[in-house]
Image (cartoon, helix red, strand yellow):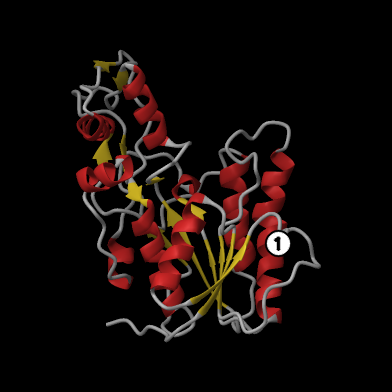
Amino acid sequence: MTTKSASTRIGIIGAGSFIGDALGRRAEASGHQVDRYTRETFDATDPDATLEPATDIVVFLAQDRNYTTLETPALGVFAVNTVGVLNAAIQARAVGARGLIYTSTGNVYEPSFAPLIESHPLARSDIYSTSKIFAEQILDLVPDDLAVVCPRLFGAYGPNQTIGLFASLTNRIRSGASVTLQSRPGGDPDGGFHASLTHVDDVAAGLLELAEQLGVDELPPVMNLAAPEPVSIEQIARAIGAGIGVEPAIEQADSPRAFDLVADTTLMQSVLDTNFRPLEVGVSQSLA
């Protein structure tokens, strides 16, 4: 049985993001006070940026505008995920917050076909994943008066999403383009790439549970946060097709895939009570 705090003042840095918006709405609906910080109201890398007094929990969801491209402005991505995270921790301590949640990513793990447990080796494969690993390591140095947890998120999807696997597949199926499936090396067709696709409202529910527990219960410093049932590209495509009334064009690739992105959720399920919706339900709600 977990212990949850009463009404909490939650500051969301990156409140205008896909996940930040969902978290803000869920937190308010649950009776918490929410302070929303966007790029326009809180520059995470500015040491003069301040949080509201009496903030209890800070949730860091900020992203540089170019985090999905990582071209010339890669310096901004690295700055937000390192300097910005350190600054957020400093500001959180300055206002007496009891905890900080930093949303990391499942992309920090070395590629694997096996479910990724929190102790799995990490890989600095690009600026984005490297900066996320550095952020986790920076937060290891935070004094004990600020409780910290770094949930590693997997495959968030939901309504009005414009980037990511779910949005890309939806656009392909709507346009009549084929969906290509890659098998494991030397393996039979298995539906293609497998991932822990997680509805954004379930991500928000998990983050809110963490916010309610942080500084009240002892939490692990890092934890996968993902739907416990992995799904294949073919399953996702067929669920989307059913939702929009279009039979997806499926074809098998000649070349194999290199890895899957599936979370081991054993630790998460020992900490959180969040119920994760099945793929068909989440896809239907996202397309409605």
Q: Where is residue 184 in the image (x, y as percent from the top left)?
A: 28, 27
Give the residue displayed 21% in from the left and 50% down from the top.
278
Q: In which quarter of the image is residue 173?
A: top left
Point out the residue furthest to the top here: 254
Q: Which residue lies furthest to the front in this view?
A: 288
| Extreme-right residue of the structure | 48
| Residue at position x 20%, y 43% in the image | 280
On the image, the x and y values in percent for residue 212 come to 42, 78
Q: Is residue 222 above or below residue 157?
A: below
Quadrant where the N terminus sits is bottom left
Q: What residue type is labelled 1?
A: Phe
Which image quarter: residue 23? bottom left
Q: What residue appears at the point 65 percent right and 43 percent down from the top-left corner?
A: 65
Percent across and percent down for residue 268 are 33, 64
Residue identified by numbered label 1: 42
In the image, 288: left or right of 67?
left
Compared to 181, does 114 lie above or below?
A: below
